[in-house]
Image (cartoon, helix red, strand yellow):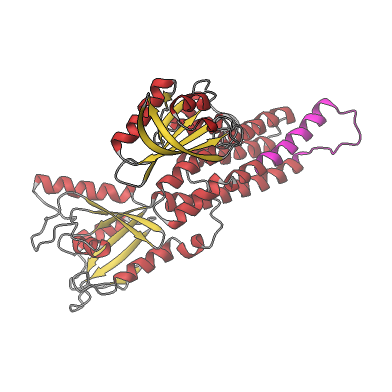
Amino acid sequence: MNDTIAAIATAQGVGAISIIRVSGSEAFSIIEKLFSNKKFVAADSHTIHYGYILDGDEIVDEVLVTKMCAPKTFTMEDIVEINTHDGISTTNKVLELLLSTGCRLAEPGEFTKRAFLNGRIDLVEAEGVMDLINAKTESASKMAINQVGGKASSLIRDLRDNLVGILANIEVNLNYPEYDDIEDITVEKIKVSMGDLDKKVNKIISESKNGELLKNGIKTVIIGKPNVGKSSLLNNLIGEEKAIVTEIQGTTRDSVEATLIMDNLILNLIDTAGIRKTDDLVESIGVEKSLRLIDEADLVLLVLDYNSELTSDDKKILSKLDGKNYITIINKCDLDKKIDDSDLKNTVYVSASENINIDGIKEKVKELFNLEQIETSDYNYLSSARSLAILNQISNAIKEVNSGLENGFTLDMIEIDLKNIWNLLGTIIGESYEDELIDELFSRFCVGK
């Protein structure tokens, strides 16, 4: 944290400019040695200066240099940003000069890590930076901006503040019983507070599952017997010939993956091998994989044949879908009807070959995942798997507190469990953390961020 770091902050390629970011106590003095405009050092903060980066007497590039003084910067350290002409050779040459003049090459995510360690942002906001960089839809972008802006973090801070009030009241009752002007803390009052906390935590968990869907997409598996039209359906949904389509049964022997962005929701589509009994070793491996993917999927698209009666293979698949989110897609609706669909649920009738009612599948997905409700929400979600895992730990810890209250545990024992919940809430926003966790989290960032 005492050294000065530098890295290229923009993707390299053919473009107008590249930005090289420098952060640390020696940032200004290092730039002074390389920058032709000597007025830069005495200039005010948050100003931009024109000049040349020099390697001795040789001009390396014509640049704009932005000066930003601590603590009003992203890292809360002195920062310089050099806008060079884009191009791998020129950008790398400027970076090379910085490194030879006293900078150290930044590690992945080190700028954001310094912002966190210096108190500029909390851990949820830091994760929001990465989510914003990787956002593939407008909804994912809105959610990330709320995290970066601290709106999601405020949900956790409010819970911690409420818990501090309970802990303080218990502490005073235990250690200062002589004060008669304090509120007596009772088991019933703690139960009421725990009920309120449990309701809020479970609401955040429920809504944050929506956040996970917006961020990572819905793992969607297309299944059915051979030649029912699964591959044609995949190709039709994504608008390209991704999967091979033939009249030969067992053409798809391994899964084929594609991504569909549908009204701010990402469907991670997987076309699978047709499910049937087979003596072909390779095909049987594909069938086993198809059955396994059903268990792993967030959504199953079961494709049936409008022009055929239900087979034992169809019924076997249907039996595996109990308790799963699934849509029954009855394909080949342009042909004569032979299927008995009286007991089928979530049905959509399509013809993949004739492009009939493909949008009906998309509407059914929206309905199944309450997409309209998600899109009208405030996007204050905690979308990381890390945060959701901790929230589930907190939910279980609240149950332990309630169990202790029911079993007559003393207030000092209850206080220990409440402090554990308070600390767990702190780990979500980074008020308490382990160095190994922080190193792992920021290592996932790209260099220069």
Nearer to me, 28 or 133: 28
Q: Assess whether residue 218 is covered by the magenta stretch.
A: no
The residue under the point 40% across, 58% down is 265
Residue in front for this viewpoint, 53 or 290: 53
Please give the count of numbered marks on the rendered protein. Answer: 0
Q: Residue at x 50, y 60 (%)?
A: 374
Q: Is residue 176 in the magenta section?
A: yes
Q: Position of residue 384 (x, y in %)?
A: 47, 42
Q: Which residue is farthest front? A: 57
Tell me, yes or no, if residue 247 can be seen here: yes
Where are the magenta residues, as a range? 159-187
Residue 333 position (above or below residue 240): below
Question: Does residue 344 appear in the picture of this structure?
Answer: no
Q: Quadrant of residue 306?
A: bottom left
Foreground residue among 388 and 399: 388
Relative to 164, 365 lies left or right: left
Instruction: Please indicate whether residue 372 sits to the left or right of residue 262 in the image.
Output: right
- Provide the major secondary structure of the magenta segment: helix
**Is residue 220 toward the left or the right of residue 378 in the image?**
left
Of 125 and 88, the residue lying toward us: 88
360 in relation to 432, above or below: below
Give the percent coordinates (x, y) of residue 171.
Answer: 77, 29
Q: Position of residue 39 (x, y in %)?
A: 54, 32
Quadrant, the C terminus: top left
Q: Position of residue 48 (x, y in %)?
A: 52, 41
Tell me the residue at 46%/52% (across/down).
141
